[in-house]
Image (cartoon, rainbow, N blue to C red):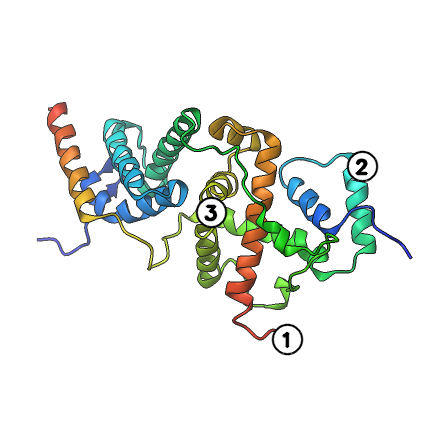
Amino acid sequence: MSTAPQKAASDSQLNLELLVEQEGDYLYHFALARVRNQETAEELVQDTFLGAARSLDSFRGQSSPRTWLTSILKHKILDYLRKKARNREVQFEDLGGDETNAFFDETGHWATGAVEWSRDPAFKFEQKEVMNVLMSCIDSLPEKLRTVFYLREVDGLSTKELQDTLGISSSNAWVMLYRARMRLRECMEQKWFNSKDLP
Amino acid sequence: MLISPISCRRAAELESKSMEQPLSFWERILLRYHYYICKHVCCNSFKEKLELMRSGCKKMSRECQDPPAESPCLSKDCKRKILDALKCCDSDKE
């Protein structure tokens, strides 16, 4: 009888059934953050595990099972978004209204409060609480901005790869990233700094 | 009195664009001149904030951090479907 916790990976051997339990929620959140549709996210996670089962031989144990599964999922998500953009199910080119107008006055000068992040010694991304605020702020972005921001800043796609995947021009990519960054900055200041009395 | 040829808004747009590609010579001059003249805290700290957010995102990507506790989970039904599909995969191989 063994009392040791079950391990999903030992050397190059993987127990995918156990990984469904251990990594399923993480992968689901990863997918949901990028596609924002529960059913699609579930399908992508399922495809990921099936893809992993077919390519078990390629797992060498050099990275963690989570990293390996995440890289499979990333490809599935990019394929999905590419297809969606190609079929024009989502018009990433349609930028909609510009909410960043609210951050400036009519002369183009800053209208919102000024917070210097460096004044708060607790504001460090090494702190789990700060990371949670960042994640929740990214999650609160509108769908298109969130997808573009995740692909660029979290998944590390280049602007060119963004253009190819989502079928957008480089100037639209810049505009969307600018809007996403402005909203994130505002969200971080509201959620982190407004709850604190800074010196 | 010195006046900046670009607004804080345009400066923020250029700063964000510079995260994607190098700015042109003229854009860099405009931005530097704006910062020289504009004393608004938002302008002076905007670049630092963009870089901080980028470093936070890179950390998120590097560490494959668990989602916040309140995040939605993969449904039991979906987990069961995946397990069933994996079993089918196994039997196909055999």
Say what amino acid the circle numbered 1 marks.
Pro
Nearest to viewer (mark 2 / mark 1): 2
Among the two numbered marks 3 and 1 on one chain, the one whose residue lies closer to the N terminus: 3
* Total number of numbered discs in the rendering: 3
Residue A47 pos. (x, y %): 27, 32
Q: Which residue is mark 1?
A: A199
Say what amino acid the circle numbered 2 marks.
Trp
Q: Nearer the viewer, residue A167 or B87?
A: A167
Q: Residues within 10 Å of mark 2 (few under 14, many from 20)?
A: few
Q: CA distance from mark 3 to mark 1?
A: 33 Å
Nearest to viewer (mark 3 / mark 2): 3
Chain ID, mark 3: A
Residue at the spot x=38%, y=40% of the render?
A35
Q: Nearer the viewer, residue B71 or A143?
A: A143
Above/below status of A175 relative to A83 = below
Residue at the spot x=77%, y=39% of the render?
B27
Residue B1 pos. (x, y %): 91, 57
Above/below status of A12 relative to A105 = above
Q: Residues within 10 Å of mark 3 (few under 14, many from 20)?
A: few
Above/below status of A139 relative to A60 = below
Residue A176 visible = yes
Q: Dot 3 lies on which element? A: loop
Q: Which residue is mark 3?
A: A142
**Tags 3 and 1 both on a single chain:** yes
Q: CA distance from mark 3 to mark 2?
A: 33 Å
Q: Name the mark on residue B26.
A: 2
Say what amino acid the circle numbered 3 marks.
Pro
The residue sitting at the left extreme is A1
Q: Dot 2 lies on which element? A: helix
